[in-house]
Each structure stands twice: as C-alpha cells, then as structure tokens.
Image (cartoon, helix red, strand yellow):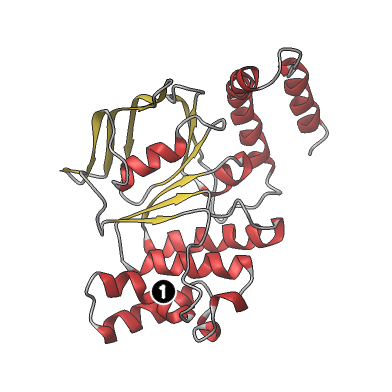
Amino acid sequence: MGLIIENISKKFISKHNQMHALEEVNLNINDGEFICIVGPSGCGKSTLLNVVAGLEKSCEGRVCLNGNVINGAGPDRAVMFQESALFPWIKVIDNVEFGMKMAGVPREERRNRALKYLKMVHLTKFQNSYIHELSGGMKQRVALARALTLDSKVLLMDEPFAALDSQTKTILQIELQQIWWETKKTIIFITHNVEEAVLLADRVIVMSANPGKIKKEFNIQLARPRKFESVDLTYLVADIMKELISEVEKVAKFEYDSDWNMEADTILSDIDNNLGAGL
C-alpha cells in the first residue's frame, strides 16, 4: 500500500508573525521506492520529513503508512539527520545497537544485527573504536548502520551527506545505492543538491518556495548504478534546475536587499551552454 501523504499543511505561529511552511502537499510513495525532495531553503522539506517521521504534527491532512494513520514516531520509520548524533562515550558497536536496545531487542539478536549492518557499511573493523577516532564520513556510516538496524519499512534521510567533503560524499552515495538495492527499503531523502537527487532517486520531487507545495515530479528512468559522468544524468539535472531557479529567486528577493538581481535568464543560458559543451 505504501506511504500516502494527503493534504498536509503546516503553519508556525509566533507572537509577531505566522509562517505557512506547507500547503496541501499530496504525494503517494510506493513500497521500496527511493524519493528525493529538492527545493529552495525554507520551503518546508525538513518539516515535511518530520511530519512523516511523526516528530511534528501537521495542521491539516494526514500521513498513512500501509493503511495506518501516523500519529507519532514509530519503529516502522527510521530517521537519519545531517548530524550523526552519536554518543561519544560508547563504542561504535554500542552506538549501532542503541536503538535496538531501547526497543527491547534481545542482546544476542541486536549484536548480530549490528554486525550485519556494520559489514554493509564496511566498518566491522572499527566496531570497538570510539566516535572521536572516526572521520566525518565514517560517523555518518555508523549513523546509517544504526538507522538500518531497526529494520524499519521506511528510512527518512534529512541531508545526511551535506556536511561531508565531495570525495566522501561520492563514496557514500554509491554505497547508499547498493544498500537500498539490497534492503528494498522505502527511502525519502532531502537534499539541496540536484545532482545527488538524480543520482539516487526513482523520482525527484521539486518543491516551491513558501508556502511549500509540490511544483513538479521527475521520473528518473536511468539504469543503476548511476555515475555523475552520465550525459543523461546531466540533462535531467539541467531540467530540474530550470524548475528550481524561479523558486530560489523568490526566496532571494525576500531575503536580500532590493538592489539584488539574480538574472535568471543568464543562469538558464549558462546551463544550456554547459550542456552544449558536454559539461
């Protein structure tokens, strides 16, 4: 039955103003589908992910997973954030086991499951290391292993690779494709990086500026595993960027001084010129 996001609206109200973060967002996601959501800063991408996770309540609408309405956080949805949020005072293996321990999984089972997913992210030889001994990319791999251990139907990822260097990010993007293929999980992945979205997703969802709405969907029908050098991938990135430019401009006009000018026509021309040059 999959995941159904139905008429989700969300407002944040403070003493001095009201922000309409999401407005009538509707999206159907099939079991095992990999969805990436892109959009300008502040368009409600992370808010939508938090509503699906059950960490925030929507003002209107509902989210259903396999016919059940989501009313809060649950073991059927695992969340991975931009920061690894690992505990520095315990070892890698204990960090990976932590969620299972809280869920009451028996000790032997959680150890076996933790080792399984540490092997999947290629970190078994660091299982007894402490977090300060790991690189940024290794920390995110530990966080990914921890998220996978709960065997949740849905994996929610909020810009998990944004803070990493480009080389580490590329490695993790390749690994994530393989992990998704092996586990067949439903993944919703938030990113500002359009190339990353096209590399990973079955569908890329473009959101508009506030209030956040779904502006357009792109079906990514490219063979896997995908590589950035693919010409087809480059053309899809350009198509999606053309949809995003006007939304980014709306945000910039609101946030920047009045003398700022994005010159969207020039940017579109640069995209076309780069494609013509084979970049």
Q: Quadrant of the C terminus?
A: top right
Q: Quadrant of the N terminus?
A: top left
The residue lying at 63 percent from left, 29 percent from top is 241
Question: What residue type is disc 1 on?
Answer: Val
**Spot occupied by residue 81 in the image (x, y as percentages of width and height):** 47, 54
The residue lying at 49 percent from left, 45 percent from top is 201
Query: In the visual, does 19 lie left or right of 209?
Result: left
Query: In the visual, does 124 lie left or right of 271?
Result: left
The residue lying at 32 percent from left, 46 percent from top is 55
Query: In the visual, does 66 lie left or right of 251?
Result: left
The residue lying at 68 percent from left, 39 percent from top is 234
**Spot occupied by residue 203 in the image (x, y as percentages of width and height):** 46, 39
Residue most extreme to the right: 277
Q: Which residue is tagged 1?
A: 96
Residue 11 drawn above or below residue 3: above
**Spot occupied by residue 40 in the image (x, y as percentages of width and height):** 57, 30
Q: From the viewer's side, name the closer residue of 33 and 110.
A: 110
Q: Circle 1 sits in a helix, a strand or a loop, which is it?
A: helix
Q: From the viewer's side, name the closer residue of 149 and 50.
A: 50
Count of numbered circles in the view: 1
